[in-house]
Image: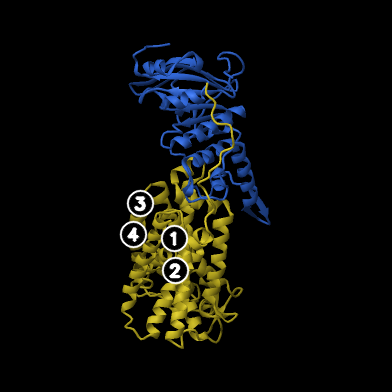
Amino acid sequence: MVTPHDAGLAVLELKGIGKEFGAIRALHGVDLRISPGEVVGLMGDNGAGKSTLVKIIAGNFPPSHGEIRFDGKPVHFGRPIDARAVGIEVVYQDLALADNLTAAANVFLGRELKRKLGPFALLDHKAMAARALELFGELRSETRPHDLVKQMSGGQRQAVAIARTRLSNAKLVMMDEPTAAISVRQVEQVLSLIHRLKEQGVAVMLISHRMPDVFAVCDRVVVMRRGEKRADKAIGDTSPEEVTSLITGAKEAA
Amino acid sequence: MATPLDSSLTFSNVGKDKWWRSGFFASQTGYVLLALVALFVVMNFASPYFLTEGNMQNVAKNFSFIAIATLGVTFVIITGGIDLSVGSVMCFSAMITSMVMTHISTPGMPGADWFVHLAPDGKTVIANMPGLILLVSVLAGLGVALVVGLVNGFCIAVLGLSPFVTTLGMLSIVRGLGYVVSNGRGSFPSGPEASYLYTLTSGVVFGMPAPFIYLVVLAVAMAVVLHHTGFGRHVFAVGGNEKAAALTGIPVVRVKIEIYVICALAAGLQGIIISGWLGSAPANMATSYELNVIAAAVIGGANLAGGIGGPLGAIVGCVLLEVIRNGLVLAQVNSYWQQTLVGVIIIAAVLVDRLRSRMA
């Protein structure tokens, strides 16, 4: 179910995005479209501009040139919270979880559900646990809401981090190296989590160095090199060998 | 395109923990409480006086004298911070309270006319509604604690200074201010309402020492705040992973300032209570109490690395320290051994926790 590249309404559209840090040109003329339910792999060597691109989309800093359109409307993000408000969530490499709290507490961190008790607003533990269980169910992950995150496997921790993005009904989820430091078995779990997001119409941008993961789960692969987009191909039209040569620069563009 | 597995994920290697290996029983607070119970049993056999009502009241009163401050420090420790200034704040708040009370209770002093006037027989009479003098002086004492807490919080959360260094400096600054305002002599509450202060701090309510009642009320409030409010959840999150807390939109700076303010207020209240019991606020009052307070919090299970702690642990730690002190006196052991033993217990409590988590 490869979504046609240039048909349908894009959830995210980048036009001519560029970024300069002083005299250093980190990004130049990047165009990119992602449709709902599409999984795009973003690949490139260190320093290719992947992180800069992700940070621009996530609202960490504005682009020097170009336009970002989200859901068809031009957007300008001053802070990450602006990007989150329109429906862009980032799952960070270190997952940004509090180990000493439960899975449910982490899912709802910063947006806890409360119930009124007289003049006081108390946490609604029951509702949060129930909703978290629902989200883990949607992701088909056997994660118990009341378990502490520090006792969890890498796959379960990913599920918690991803469930957090589902809570806000994010339309675009960017995942930074989600399979970098976990076991083979857990990699499968994470890839299946990405699949669940796709099923629910969420666009996913997977930033990864691991070729097999990208080819297993992505519809499209975008290769960055020296701040420019060198390739943007449907997975079926390319091969790991071609992508590798694009990343290293053995092949200039495709 | 390869399809990832579609079946529901199951973890055959994840089981349910045994009850004694999870929750309260697996926590440091849990087994320190167990040790405390054992100590009670041993003491009961060792000394016939130990479990008498008089002695128990004594123990309850004595540990209440550091336990309220320990609740405050526990808040700070949960966020991964530390507050070394509590001892100085105790003294300074107590001193300001008794100085303000003395000032506004002395007819002829500027501003005092509003509170007292001189009766024809030469006695000082309360001019306004009773209790106002006490209220104003206690609020003044808590007010200076609030300021100290705000400064601590600002330096740590906004300027990014280390909590250890900031509060070490504040320990010295506040202690110094205490000597300055009192000229090193200390002060004692006087005037027509000093007796109210004594009643409220060293009186007996429902057969229990008043400070103990305050402690119980505050500990329950703290438990509710920590486990059933958004603020409490954020306190734990900041201690568990500050970066994550910030990324999820928790106002980390505000939370940190608030906990240092709470800690300073708890210390200030504690100081006022101690001075009511002592009948004065000497300039060297509560010197090095910060060490007892932090020791009690750590023995009770608060983790200096942040993320773990609670009111029960704080109280258990304080009780344990006091029972040992009391027990050594009853057993007629040279009381100088006390400090050495406290040190051994701090290390033992943390050591047992480490061994347990290694076995699990």
- Residues at circles 3 and 4 in contact by the CB criterion of under 8 Å: no
Q: Is residue B155 left or right of residue B312?
A: left
Between marks 4 and 2, how big is the CA–CA gap? 23 Å
Between marks 4 and 1, how big is the CA–CA gap? 20 Å
First along the sequence among labels 4 and 1: 4
Label 3 element class: loop
Label 1 element class: loop
Quarter of the picture containing the N terminus of chain A is top right
Between marks 2 and 3 in the image, the one whose residue lies nearer the viewer: 2
Question: Label 1, on which residue?
Answer: B302
Crowd rating for badge 4 (residues with CA inside 10 Å; few <14, some 14–19, many 20+): some
Label 4 element class: helix
First along the sequence among labels 3 and 4: 3
Q: Are marks 4 and 1 on the same chain?
A: yes
Crowd rating for badge 3 (residues with CA inside 10 Å; few <14, some 14–19, many 20+): some
Question: Label 2, on which residue?
Answer: B317
- Amino acid marked by disc 4: Leu
Between marks 3 and 1, how big is the CA–CA gap? 19 Å
Q: Residue at x 57, y 63 (%)?
A: B221
Between marks 3 and 4, how big is the CA–CA gap? 10 Å
B279 to B306, vertically: above or below: below
A63 to B216, vertically: above or below: above
